[in-house]
Image: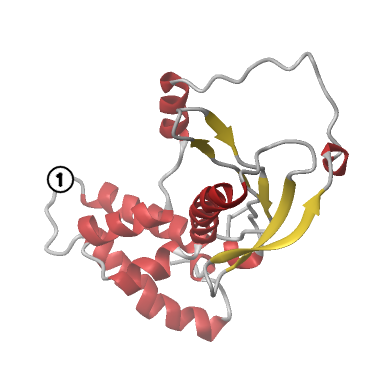
Amino acid sequence: TDGIMQRGHMRFEPNVNVVVFDGAGQEHRTPIVEVKNLNSFKALRGAIEHEHERQAKQWLEDGRVMGPGAKSTRGWDDERGITVLQREKEDAHDYRYFPDPDLVPVVVDDAWLSRVRAAVPELPMARRARYRSEFGLDEKDAHALVDDPLLCRFYEACVDAVHLRTGSQVPTVHPGFAVAKLLLNAGAKRSNERALPINELGI
């Protein structure tokens, strides 16, 4: 998948609950809430932050904790920035759970996190920032390139090719800036005329 949120390539359904400590220092865990069909990182963050606050307040009101019949499903209202109840889960069988005594504990340590972080490719926000700082692109051009994965890969390949061609020469204009203007201006015009993606024009 290209991970284009608007096309439904990615969905999140976080399960959220909160650990609360009372005045005596005793730990209480609020009922698990599953938030359904979140289609952006912004919605994911908003839903989790809202549930964190809502569940803490709810516990202060009713003292309800995690246990049989305490699960629920909620949806995310993006306009109001809140979750809304969809249905209560009466028991674990609603989730089709079954016990498995052979499951081993999952330990997330710093070394594992470091390996995962090292394997994560450059994310769109970071790439746009790099294009602005390194190539001198404005926000509009950086978005136009990064938001189209095929065009972005073609753009990177073109910039690399220019670097190889120029070698140690110091150009008056950064190749990244010059290539971006070529693709987004003349390339876009030719793309419309020939009804072909820019990366298939044979530039």
Taking the image as shown, residue 68 lies to the left or right of residue 175, namely right
Where is 51 relative to 95, above or below? below
Quarter of the image where one finds residue 110: top left
Estimate the x, y position of residue 120 in percent, counting from the top left: 46, 38
Of residues 85 and 155, which is closer to you in this image? Answer: 85
Disc 1: which residue: 168
Q: Residue at x 47, y 65 (%)?
A: 147
Residue density around tag 1, few if under 14, some if 14–19, many if 20 or more, within 10 Å: few
Q: Residue at x 57, y 33 (%)?
A: 28
Estimate the x, y position of residue 200 in percent, counting from the top left: 54, 66
- Please state which amino acid type lies under the numbered disc 1: Ser
Estimate the x, y position of residue 116 in percent, counting from the top left: 47, 30
Taking the image as shown, residue 100 lies to the left or right of residue 11, namely right
Q: Residue at x 30, y 70 (%)?
A: 139
Classify mark 1: helix, strand or loop. loop
Position of the C terminus by quadrant: bottom left
Where is 21 relative to 177, above or below? above
Estimate the x, y position of residue 70 in percent, counting from the top left: 74, 44
Of residues 202 and 189, which is closer to you in this image? Answer: 189
Quarter of the image where one finds residue 15: top right
The colour mode here is secondary structure
Of residues 196 and 114, which is closer to you in this image? Answer: 114
Query: Looking at the image, which residue sits at the far bottom?
Result: 193
Q: Residue at x 63, y 52 (%)?
A: 12
